Amino acid sequence: MMFHSKKQLGFSLIELMVVLAIMAVSMSLTGGLITNVVSKQERFVEIEKVKQLVLSLKYKAFYTGSDFKVDFIENRILITGIYEKKEFVFNQLIFSSQKLEIYSNGTSNNKYFETLIGEEVITINLPSPYKENEKV
């Protein structure tokens, strides 16, 4: 008598369903955490973009000898100069309504800006083009 053994060529349907169920449960548990981390990183990147934008405007004001007005309105920043007008839109940041003036010596009337994160108002310090101990 000869016995023929079946060679298993793949996974059974039940094994695949169990693996998919485990993956679904693990994704549902960690999915919220991943989206929170991603949105925090996007906010951090946008805050750094605002800082770099203001710093570059301070340098530009100093080297061109012209003033700039920066308006923070909702999720937008409006920049008005002598020869230009620009608008920047942000996805994660909501600004408190405020005005920033950048003078031709590279300084500004404010040292910070405010943004809303959830229900909390966060104050972010703006960078200066000068060293800490250097006076203009």
Image (tube, rainbow, N blue to C red):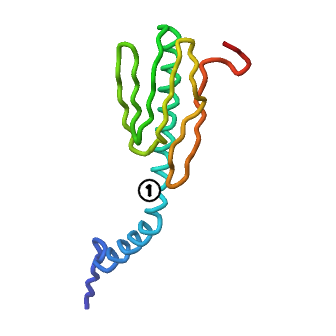
> Image quarter for residue 72?
top left
SS at badge 1: helix
Name the one closer to the observer, 34 or 22: 34
Q: Which residue is mark 1?
A: 35
> Image quarter for residue 8?
bottom left
Q: Which residue in the rendered view is the most extreme toward the right?
A: 133
Packing grade of label 1 (10 A; few <14, some 14-19, many >=20) is: few
Name the one closer to the observer, 73 or 39: 73
| Amino acid on which the number 1 mark rests in the picture | Thr
Picture mark count:
1
> Image quarter for residue 106?
top right
- Say whether residue 97 is left or right of residue 109: left
Name the spot of residue 4 as percent of width and height, x first.
26, 84
Tell me which residue sits at (55%, 48%) in the image: 121
Q: Quadrant of the C terminus?
A: top right
Name the spot of residue 61 as percent of width and height, x first.
49, 14
Tell me which residue sits at (48%, 20%) in the image: 57
Tell me which residue sits at (47%, 64%) in the image: 30
Tell me which residue sits at (49%, 35%) in the image: 98
Residue 121 versus residue 9 in the image, above or below: above
Residue 79 versus residue 43 in the image, above or below: above
Residue 36 versus residue 89 in the image, above or below: below
Q: Quadrant of the N terminus?
A: bottom left
Name the spot of residue 13 as percent of width and height, x first.
28, 78
Name the spot of residue 101 as percent of width and height, x first.
51, 23
